[in-house]
Image (spheres, rainbow, N blue to C red):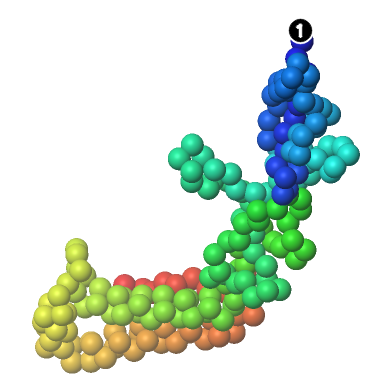
Amino acid sequence: MLMSTIHTFDLRTGAFINSRPAQVVGGKELTVCANATPVAPPTDIPTGHAARWTGSAWEVVEDHRQHMDSKGTKIGGTPYWQPAEGDDWQSPPRYTEELGPLPEGAVTERPKKPLSVLKAEKEREITAACDAAIVASLTMPTSAPSSAEVAVAAASLASIDPDGPDTLLALHTARRDELLAAVAAADSTAALADVEVSYAV
């Protein structure tokens, strides 16, 4: 005797779970129960979608949920952010537990850093590079010199050319100020990216 097949679904979400033979009780097949239907779900379900029971039929909907692996760890899913709710570049991604499209206003790309933050990062890069250029000009090191080595190099240069240290300092700080002015004038991330941090050593 060929057994009927029933198709189970999650009572809360309606998501398809699996298909199995109907139970037989008292010689009769039970093809209808609280979380199952004899109606077969669609067989051609695109990636990122799932079959959902509506109460009378199956429908195919987006599925952005995470799923449990064999160890019970949540994996996959579609990370998203809600800028209208305050999410920014520092916010951790959100994940939905519901079937269907992502919430209105959701974006799947992490929000970009604001220009003010990018400028502050660039300014720190410029200042650090200036300090490194001054040290390198004094010592021409093959590795990072100690503060004592820098002091000795500066004294040595001053003994040969009294204005040497001041000239080097003026050269690099002028370049630093030029770069900082370019950062201040940048009105877009593209313009900021065009500011190339470089010093003549």
Query: In the figure, is residue 119 to the left or right of 176?
Result: right
**In which quadrant will I find the N terminus?**
top right
Disc 1: which residue: 1
Note whether 174 is above or below 111 in the view shown: below
Residue 160 screen position, x and y as percent: 14, 85
Asked whether the viewer can see residue 43, the reply is: no
Q: Quadrant of residue 150?
A: bottom left
Residue sitting at x 88%, y 39%: 56
- Pick the front one: 59 or 197: 59
Q: Quadrant of residue 182?
A: bottom right
| Extreme residue in the front direction | 26
Other residues around mark 1 within 10 Å, as few (<14) / some (14–19) / many (≥20): few
| Extreme residue in the top direction | 1
Query: In the figure, is residue 102 to the left or right of 154?
Result: right
Amino acid on which disc 1 is placed: Met
Residue 72 screen position, x and y as percent: 48, 43
Q: Quadrant of residue 193?
A: bottom right
| Extreme residue in the right direction | 56
